[in-house]
């Protein structure tokens, strides 16, 4: 999370009514209350309404906002206005329209992504039904909103997203990657992934060439059975 320079940033203190700023314990101003993160609209309104303190914590390797300290009177007023707006029929209609648009957009992307996966797989005709099943499995895993997978990024072309999603799915489903003990050496995890990706590509090549595959031994066939 990128913290704005003008924001007064504090960290949770040991006591409920104490916060930390530059290592010093502070008590929020009299009449202020804490509002947890979770309602983006409310947070934006409170930030625009007046003074506030942004409270953060560290999660893994990044700093995240966990809420705001602000005047209780301001919070009450902003919440009342926001609730009135949200209960307005026009607002509800707008929300419903937006929801339908996002659902239609998601459905379209699912089809486009699945087709891109099939194109990358390029299995021989005798394995076409298997490719369809494979594409379904990768798509179900990769495309949901909020999944955090490579399929959700817009930074690379769709074709590369599909390829990366297939290789990632195979890494987790057809190899022992998730249970591997990988040395904490710079570049080691990347090298392990590279080797596993090469194995996955070799496996895919068998289905692309149309050769016979013993599905009772093939790790991919076992997962998709």
Image (cartoon, rainbow, N blue to C red):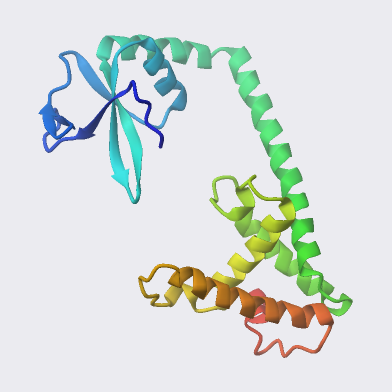
x then y, percent, for residue 222: 64, 81
Q: Residue at x 69, y 63 (%)?
A: 163
Q: Residue at x 35, y 25 (%)?
A: 5
Count of all numbered marks drawn on residues in the image: 0
Q: From the viewer's perspective, is residue 90 above or below residue 170?
A: above
x then y, percent, for residue 134: 71, 68
Would residue 180 be found to the left or right of residue 163 on screen?
left
User: Which image quadrant: the C terminus?
Assistant: bottom right
Residue toward you, 205 or 145: 205
x then y, percent, for residue 139: 68, 58
Q: Quadrant of residue 165?
A: bottom right
Would residue 119 be found to the left or right of residue 65 on screen?
right
Q: Residue at x 76, y 44 (%)?
A: 108
Would residue 152 be found to the left or right of residue 54 on screen?
right
Q: Residue at x 61, y 71 (%)?
A: 170
Q: From the viewer's perspective, is residue 58 above or below residue 194?
A: above
Q: Quadrant of residue 173?
A: bottom right
x then y, percent, for residue 58: 29, 44
User: Which image quadrant: the N terminus?
Assistant: top left
What residue occupies the far right of the structure in this picture?
125
Q: From the viewer's perspective, is residue 196 above or below residue 70?
A: below
């Amino acid at each position: 999370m990128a913290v704005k320079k003008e924001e007064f940033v504090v960290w949770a203190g040991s006591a409920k009514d104490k916060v930390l700023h530059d290592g010093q314990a502070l008590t929020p101003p009299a009449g202020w209350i804490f509002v947890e993160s979770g309602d983006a609209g409310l947070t934006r309104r409170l930030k625009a309404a007046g003074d506030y303190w942004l409270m953060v914590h560290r999660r893994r390797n990044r700093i995240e906002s966990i809420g705001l300290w602000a005047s209780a009177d301001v919070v009450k007023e902003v919440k009342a206005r926001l609730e009135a707006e949200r209960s307005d029929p026009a607002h509800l209609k707008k929300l419903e329209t937006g929801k339908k648009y996002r659902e239609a957009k998601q459905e379209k992307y699912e089809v486009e992504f699945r087709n891109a996966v099939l194109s990358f797989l390029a299995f021989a005709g005798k394995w076409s039904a298997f490719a369809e099943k494979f594409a379904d499995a990768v798509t179900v895993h990769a495309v949901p909103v909020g999944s955090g997978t490579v399929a959700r990024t817009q930074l690379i072309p769709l074709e590369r997203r599909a390829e990366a999603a297939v290789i990632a799915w195979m890494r987790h489903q057809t190899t022992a990657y998730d249970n591997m003990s990988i040395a904490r050496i710079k570049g080691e995890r990347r090298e392990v992934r590279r080797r596993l990706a090469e194995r996955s590509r070799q496996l895919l090549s068998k289905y692309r060439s149309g050769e016979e595959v013993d599905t009772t031994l093939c790790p991919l066939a076992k997962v998709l059975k």
